[in-house]
Image (tube, rainbow, N blue to C red):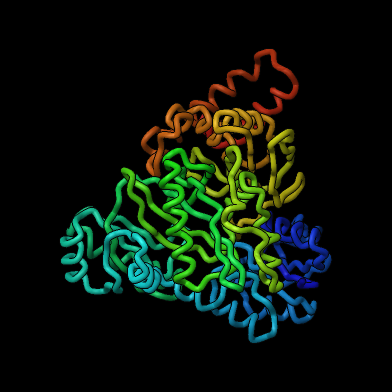
Amino acid sequence: MLNKVLIANRGEIAIRIMRACKELGITTVAVFSDADKKALFVRYADEKYNIGPGPANQSYLMKDNIIDAALKSKAEGIHPGYGFMAENADFAEMCHKNGIEFIGPPVSSMKLMGSKIDSKKSMMKAGVYVVPGVTEAISDHEKAKNIAHEIGYPVMLKASAGGGGIGIQMVENENKMEKALTSVRQLAKNSFGDDSVFIEKFIEDPRHIEYQIIGDKKNHLIHCFERECSVQRRHQKLIEETPSCALTPELREEIGEQAVLVAETAGYYNAGTCEFMFKDGKYYFLEMNTRLQVEHPITEATTGVDLAREQLRIASGLELEYDQNDIRPRGHAIECRINAEDPMNNFAPAPSKIIKYAEPSGPGIRIDSGVYQGFTIPPFYDSMMAKLIIWAEDRQRAIERTKRALWEFQIGGVRHNIPFHQVVMENKQWIKGEYDTSFIPRYRILDKVVEHVKEMKSQLSSTRTAAAMAAVQTVIIASNKLHQKE
C-alpha cells in the first residue's frame, strides 16, 4: 500500500480523496495556492505546500511546482482528482519519470482518449457504437461543408482535445459553417493547445448517460452501472441520478458491456467513465473521461463501492475487490451540485464570503463540501461549493428527501443555485423522469426560478417556524440581483 499521497487538487474533491487515504492509513499532502491558504482541504491534510499565486495557471496547473512538492514531501503517489491535471498525459509521464505513482490510468490510455479523433477510430474498429461522423481533423471550410452535407445538418464541431463542454458548437446550415469552424479551432487552440476539430452528426435533445468503469492492473475490468446526467447548462452537468429512468434492464446490461469493451480497447485500469448519448432507444459512445467524475458519489451510494478507495488500492498494485456479479445497485441516488453562481443571471459565477453555512443532515444524506462559514470563495476556480448526495429506497422517496435537504441547506452572503434545484425537484417532467439535455430551456426553468424566489420573498411575513424562516432567508439572499432590480 502507498504510504504517502499528494492530492494535486483543491476543494471538496481533495477532502474526499484525503478521507479515503486516512481510512487506508495513508499520509496526505495538500498543495495549495495563495487564494486557498485558509481552505478546508489545507486544514485537513497532514502536510501542505504552497505552489503559487491564486490563478490556476500559476499554481494548480504548474506541473513542476506540483512535482517539486511531491519530491520534497517524499510522496509515493499523486492523485489528480478531477480537472486541472487529471487528464494531462504529460503530467502523468512526469510523475512516472520521477518515480511517483500517478493514481489514474496508464499514459497510453490517457493519450488515446485525450484525442476524440483517435479514440473514435479505435472504438469503431473494436465494434463500439459511435456517433455518426468523420474520424479526421477538418481545417478546410469547403471540405467541412461537403462532409456536413453527407452527414446531414445539423452537425456538431468538436475539439479533438476538448473536455468540460469546451470546444463544442452546433452548426445548423452551411452558411454558418465557416465562421463556426474558425471559432471552434481558435478556441481549441487557446484552451488545449491543439486546434484539431472534427465533425459529428448532431443528435437533437438526447439523454446523456455515462457508465462508471473501474479496473486493476491485471486486466480485471468491471462497470458499476450508469448515471443519468441530462440536466445541463452549457454542456456542463448540474444534477445527476442513478439509475436512469430511460433504460430497460436489457439495455442497461448491453450498454454496460459496451462500456467495458471501450475500456478494454483502451488498455485501461483505475477509474474512468464512458459517456453515451441515448435517443429513441438507441445509444452512441461519445467519449471516455480518464478520471474520477464529480458525480461518482451517487454510484457509491447505490453500489456500495468506494471508488476513491479502489483507486488507491489499484495504484498500490492490489487487485480490484469486486467482480461484475458483485455489483448489484440498490435504491436510487440523486446529486445536486451546489454552486456559487446566479441562476437568474445565466448561472454567472458569484464568488464571495460565506457569512452563513449550515448543511442538511439525516438518513440518506451525504454532503461533500470544501467550504465553511467565514470562508471567502476565490474567483479563480470552478464555482462548486458542495455536492448534495441523496439516497433512498426508490426515486420518488429520493426526490422527496432531496427537496427536504435543499430546504434545510442554508448559505448566506453568496448567490447560489439552490433555488434552481428546488424548482427542478417540483417540475412534472423531472418527477416523471421524462427529460433530456434540452430540459432547462424547454421548460423555462430559469424563468420559474425567478417566480420561485419572488414567492418565497412574499412568504417572509407569514407565520412560520424558525427553521422555515431560515430556509426562506437563504433563498432571498440568493436573489440579490432581483432585489437590486426592485
Give the side of residue 231 with respect to residue 56, left or right. Answer: left
Front residue (pair 321, 485): 321
Q: Is residue 446 above or below residue 219?
A: above
Q: Please tell me which residue is depicted at 79% across the width and 79% down the height of the picture.
A: 74
Which residue lies most toward the top here? 463
Q: Quadrant of residue 40?
A: bottom right
Picture coordinates of residue 398, whole percent (x, y): 59, 33
Kindly give the residue lying farthest to the front in the view shown.
Answer: 325
Q: Is residue 84 visible?
A: no
Horizontal side, residue 413 vs residue 57: left or right: right
Q: Is residue 357 left or right of residue 445?
A: right
Q: How many marks?
A: 0
Q: Give the quarter of the image for residue 355.
A: top right
Q: Is residue 284 visible?
A: yes
Q: Quadrant of the N terminus?
A: bottom right
Q: Does residue 407 sit above or below 270 in this rendering? A: above
The image shows residue 61 at horizontal and vertical percentages of 60, 72
Q: Position of residue 247 (x, y in %)?
A: 43, 42
Residue sitting at x 30%, y 55%? 170
On screen, residue 476 above or below 11: above
| Residue depicted at x 55% and y 49% | 349
Which residue is drawn at the image coordinates 65% and 70% (left, top)?
Answer: 103
Q: Nearer the viewer, residue 255 or 275?
A: 255
Q: Is residue 85 left or right of residue 200?
A: right
Relative to the observer, which residue lies in front, 268 or 13? 268
